[in-house]
């Protein structure tokens, strides 16, 4: 797949994915591509995106992650976990509530951690509160 930034005669720009460059030419010649804003069929491509998705590349990359690297990442995550357990107050599933309390009452102690549901996270985000989340690894295994 290849991504093109397309432009119509009225300078509207939009992105579109094509199988390959030939496919783009074919659709263009058949006037099957139109501007998503004004439906103009006077389309030309601007800059070709260098991001070409090659699924094969993705898979081989995944295979390259060896066990050693996984262990290293896991150790790093364990270090983060230990740091948080030592320096942060655990509030369990009360996290969303506590965070709001801190946020709206301007409390200084922001070192808390716990769990939230996806809905709670979404709700907090709507109120302008962003949470950081880290993968929580088990100490065992
Ligand atoms: Zn247009």
Image (tube, rainbow, N blue to C red):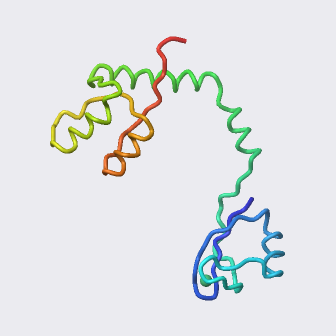
- Give the quadrant of the C terminus: top right
Q: Is residue 91 above or below residue 118?
A: above
68 or 94: nearer the eye? 94
Q: Residue 129 versus residue 68: which sits nearer the camera?
A: 129
Above or below, comparing residue 134 to residue 17 in the picture: above
Determine whether, in the image, residue 29 is placed left or right of residue 60: right
Q: Residue at x 61, y 83 (%)?
A: 38
x, y percent for residue 69: 58, 26
Query: Which of the 4 image quarters holds residue 119?
Result: top left
Report the number of numbered marks: 0
Q: Is residue 93 left or right of residue 61?
A: left
Above or below — where is 18 with respect to 66? below
- The picture quadrant for ligand 1 comes to bottom right
Instruction: Check the image and name the residue furthest to the top.
Output: 140
Quadrant including the N terminus: bottom right
Q: Residue at x 69, y 82 (%)?
A: 43
Classify residue 12 by image quadrant. Answer: bottom right
Classify residue 79 by image quadrant: top left
- Residue 97: give x, y in percent of width and height: 28, 35
Tell me if 23 is positioned left or right of 119 in this view: right
In the rendered image, residue 82, in percent from the top left (x then y), is placed at: 36, 19
State the image coordinates of residue 81 (x, y, percent, origin top left).
39, 23
Q: Residue at x 82, y 81 (%)?
A: 29
Task: Out of 82 and 93, give the one closest to the viewer.
Answer: 93
């Amino acid at each position: 797949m290849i991504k093109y930034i397309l432009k119509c005669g009225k300078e509207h720009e939009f992105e579109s994915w094509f199988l390959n460059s030939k496919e783009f030419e074919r659709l263009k010649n058949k006037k099957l591509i139109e501007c998503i804003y004004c439906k103009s069929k006077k389309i030309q491509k601007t800059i070709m995106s260098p991001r070409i998705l090659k699924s094969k590349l993705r898979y081989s990359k995944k295979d390259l992650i060896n066990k050693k690297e996984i262990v290293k990442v896991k150790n790093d995550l364990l270090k983060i976990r230990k740091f948080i357990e030592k320096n942060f107050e655990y509030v369990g599933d009360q996290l969303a509530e506590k965070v709001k309390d801190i946020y709206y009452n301007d409390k200084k102690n922001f070192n808390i951690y716990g769990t939230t549901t996806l809905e709670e996270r979404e709700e907090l985000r709507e109120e302008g509160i962003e949470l950081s989340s880290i993968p929580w690894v088990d100490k065992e295994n």
